[in-house]
Amino acid sequence: MTEKRKGNIMLTVKDKKFYLNGEEFKIHSGSLHYFRALPEYWESLLTKIKAAGFNCVETYTCWNLHEPHKGTFNFEGMLDLERFIETADKVGLKVILRTGPFICAEWENGGLPAWLLKDPSIRLRCNSEPYITHLHDWFRVLLAKIKPYLDTNGGPVITMAVENEYGSFGDDFSYLAKVKEIYLEAGIDCLLFASDGSGEFYFCTGRADMDMIQATDFGVGNAKNEIVRIDQFDNRMPYFCVEYWAGNFSSWCEAACYKDSIEKTKQDINDMVDLGASFNVYMIYGGTNFGFTGGANTTGPTPIRYFTTSYDYDAAITEWGGYTQRYFDMKEALERDAGKPSGIPVPPSPTFQNIGEVALTECANLFDNQHIGNKYHSTTVECMEHFDQNFGYILYKKVMDYTCPVDYVDMVDMRDRAYVFLNGEFMGMRQRGEDETAVKLPRTLVKGDVIEILVENMGRICFARPTYLGDRKGILGGVFLSSHPTVGGKCAFNWDVTCFEMDNIEKVNYKEGTETKCPAFFKGSFKAENQDSCFIHFDNFTKGYIFVNGFNLGRYWDRGPQTALYLPGALLKEENEIVVFEAEGLKGAPVLTFDDKHGLGDHNPEVIVK
């Protein structure tokens, strides 16, 4: 617990300026999401932020991981928010918290728990029951943990957001007022702010009331004009950019998406410093969408963009803790503003290890290991959320109890990627927004045939038109058996359902060798000389997930742009187990390569610090 400092007062605003402890204070912050980095690296990363001259760190909180099931809470390991705040305080950084409940952040479902979607009538991000009741229950737990760390209680948390970019979503002022009311009831008495896109279209519905601070978000290239647009809406506000997008995220099946040039970032930071503005660099460190946490976005029914495992963001500090030129440009600008160096040496760049090739020598077919899933029988095809499933894959199985002249299987409203099997043989794959046509079978169905459909959740939508928020997974509209690819058939009822969360792969039963049909698990082992990090290249694999010592590193996909997964060295031991779940099929021997090549395409070159 942070030791209480007597005489500390809350961050305040006067004459368009921030004041802390009665002295003018310019917020120079960088975003680092604690849930996108292993806790073993928090102090090192925060020290790098401090060494560049920043005085704050900003983070979201992720409701969906903290409360994976209603009433079950997790604040351990990577989710130890209190430890993160204490570490920031130890390093000498103030903390900006954005607790949502919706955070966007290219994060699965925008941080909202999947279990909210089990109720088909629920309405999100508005003053509607039962959403408000669930939100109140969550905040009662979260805010009690945060309260002791507020600056009013001697802690490092100087300001908190109410919701997130709500001006991009809706206009329910009663909802924003309810969120603020819950904060106040919980004793959250620090300065509160709203964060919205730049311009009156966003500002006009983003705040609970006019007494709140209005902050803004924008990207590179025109910061000195964007940040002053706050004046057009409320000229009492300090210039405060909560998200200055220095870089960008990437999506699968697209070229690596970096926001803009380092030169423009340098100009923007200097311009904001010269204006006396407060700002938060999003992201100063991007990190990783470990496991199944990467989200998706869309501006309509299609296309759907699914975010890569790497959230490197082309940030000042790389996914693996190195430095790009952005870091030193920002450091120069901040030290110029302060009139002195940060006083903290820049920590050295990380070192890597090259383990080389690792052969996987055991295998296990998924369909032979259905005991690792949760089993149900359902009259109708239902979504994942109906079965209390958050992540992973869902398998629908139907045994034909009649013979019928149909040879097409049609999946209506399938999300996101489905593999169709007949008597264990692969018949075809379909993907949401890419190819959703009926799957042709080689013959008509007879009594005793087994139809199986394996559907992957590739990430719930986190940013889109409001109508796409609440992105349920699996098959929503039903399965139809037809004799024609475009003519409606008969609805198929009575399914056995198995939900694979992939959170208990230690129970998989393997056999020696690698001869098996996919989807399948492949297992091997390797030695590590130390706990230096490295990158895993999956050239002989197509699509799936990689686990090291039981930890899910995230999704790989041969479509790119990401061609290797980051393996944090803190996960390594002398003897290590690696498991690959391959959904589609090998392109060669099941061999992986561990080396020091990041696999992020045109990532800006690193600056090595020794």
Image: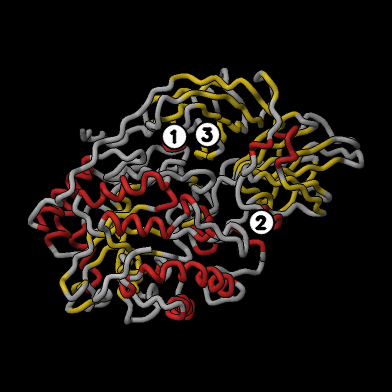
Q: On screen, 579 above or below 477?
A: above
- Relative placement, left or right, of 125 versus 429 is left
Three-letter amino acid code at the position of disc 3? Val
State which mark lies toward you, 3 or 2.
Answer: 3
User: Looking at the image, is 253 positioned above or below residue 155?
Assistant: above
Residue drawn at (58%, 22%) of the image: 360
Label 1 crowd (10 A; few <14 / some 14-19 / many >=20): many
Separation of residues labelled 3 and 2 (CA atoms): 28 Å
- The one nearer the camera, 99 or 204, is 99
Q: Disc 2 designates what residue? A: 385
SS at mark 2? helix
Name the amino acid, label 2.
Glu
Residue on which disc 1 sits = 567
Judged from the image, the secondary structure of the residue bearing numbered disc 1 is strand
Dot 3: what SS? strand
**Residue type for callout 1:** Leu
Which labelled disc corresponds to residue 548?
A: 3
Mark closest to the chain's N terminus, 3 or 2: 2
Where 247 falls versus 467 (above or below)? above
- Residue 192 point in image, percent of width and height: 34, 74
Tell us which disc is closer to us: 2 or 1. 1
User: Measured from the top left, where is residue 311 in percent x and y?
Assistant: 40, 44
> In the image, 291: left or right of 368?
left
Judge the density around disc 2: few (<14), some (14-19), many (≥20) Cα neighbours within 10 Å.
many
